[in-house]
Image: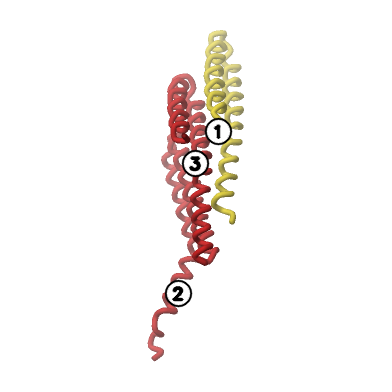
Chain colours: A yellow, B red
Amino acid sequence: MSLDVNTIFQIAGIGIIVAMIQTVLKQMGKEDWAQWVTLIGFVVILAMAATLIDDLFQKIKNVFLFF
Amino acid sequence: MDIIQIVGIGLAATFLALLLKEKSPVFASLLTLVVGTLIFITLVDQIKLVMDMLRQIAVTAHLNTIYVATVLKIIGIAYIAEFGAQIAKDGGQANLAGKIEMAGKVIILVMAIPILTAIVETVLQLMPQMGGG
C-alpha cells in the first residue's frame, strides 16, 4: 500500500515558494500582485485537497454505504 | 509496515506545517487537511477488511441484511462526521465542529428509526395482550 506522499511535499513546496514570492513582491512595492499570487497558490492547493477528499469519500461510500 | 509509513508521514507533515505556519498559516492548515485525508484513505482500506468480515458473519448467521446495512451506514456516517468536525476544529471553528457533530448524531438517529421500530414491535409481540384476557 503506497501512499501518495508527493502531494504533501508539493503542497509544502508551493506554500514556501508562494511565501517567498510574496516577500519579494512586497519588497518591490507591489502589494496587489502579492495578494494575487497568494490567492492563486491557495486555489491550486485547494483543488488538490478537494480531489483527495473526493477520493476519500468515494472510498468510504464503497466500504460502508453500499452492499 | 503500514504503521511506520503513517507515523513517518505524520512526522514529516508536522515539521513541514511548522515551517509553513510562520510564513502562511493558510497553507499549513491545508497541508494538515491533506495529510489527514491521506491517512484516512490508508485506514479505509484496512477498515474494508473488517467490514467484509462482519458482512460475511452476518450472512452466515442469516441476519436480516437491512439491519446490518443500516449499522454499517451508521458507522460510516460517524466516521465522516468525525473527520469533518476535526477539520473544522483544526481551522479554529469549534462552533462549526459542534454543528457538524450534531448533524451526524441527528442523521444517525434518523437512520436508526427502522431498527428502533422493529425492536418496539418485537417487544410488543412478546408481551401478553394488555387487558385482553
Disc 1 is attached to a residue of which chain? A
Disc 2 is attached to a residue of which chain? B
User: Residue B69's spot in the image, x, y percent?
Assistant: 53, 59
User: Residue A35's spot in the image, x, y percent?
Assistant: 57, 20
Q: Amino acid at mark 3?
A: Leu
Q: Which mark is residue B43?
A: 3
Given contact means CB atoms under 8 Å apart, are the residues at marks 3 and 2 in contact? no
Residue at (47% x, 50% y) in the render? B78
Query: On the rendered image, what quadrant is the C terminus of chain B found in?
Result: bottom left
- Is residue A63 in view from this perspective? yes
- Asked if labels 1 and 3 share a chain, the reply is no
- Asked if labels 1 and 2 share a chain, the reply is no
Q: Amino acid at mark 1?
A: Ser
Please tell me whether residue A7 is drawn above or below residue A24 in the rendered image: below
Nearer to us in this view, A41 or B18: B18
Q: Which mark is residue A2?
A: 1
| Residue hosting label 2 | B122
Which one is in front in this view, the residue at disc 1 or the one at disc 3? 1
Disc 1 secondary structure class: loop
> How far is the residue under mark 3 from the one under mark 2?
37 Å
> How far is the residue under mark 1 from the one under mark 2?
48 Å
Label 1 crowd (10 A; few <14 / some 14-19 / many >=20) = few
Disc 2 secondary structure class: helix
Disc 3 secondary structure class: helix
Label 3 crowd (10 A; few <14 / some 14-19 / many >=20) = few
> How far is the residue under mark 1 from the one under mark 3?
12 Å
- Is residue B107 in view from this perspective? no
Disc 3 is attached to a residue of which chain? B
Given contact means CB atoms under 8 Å apart, are the residues at marks 1 and 2 in contact? no
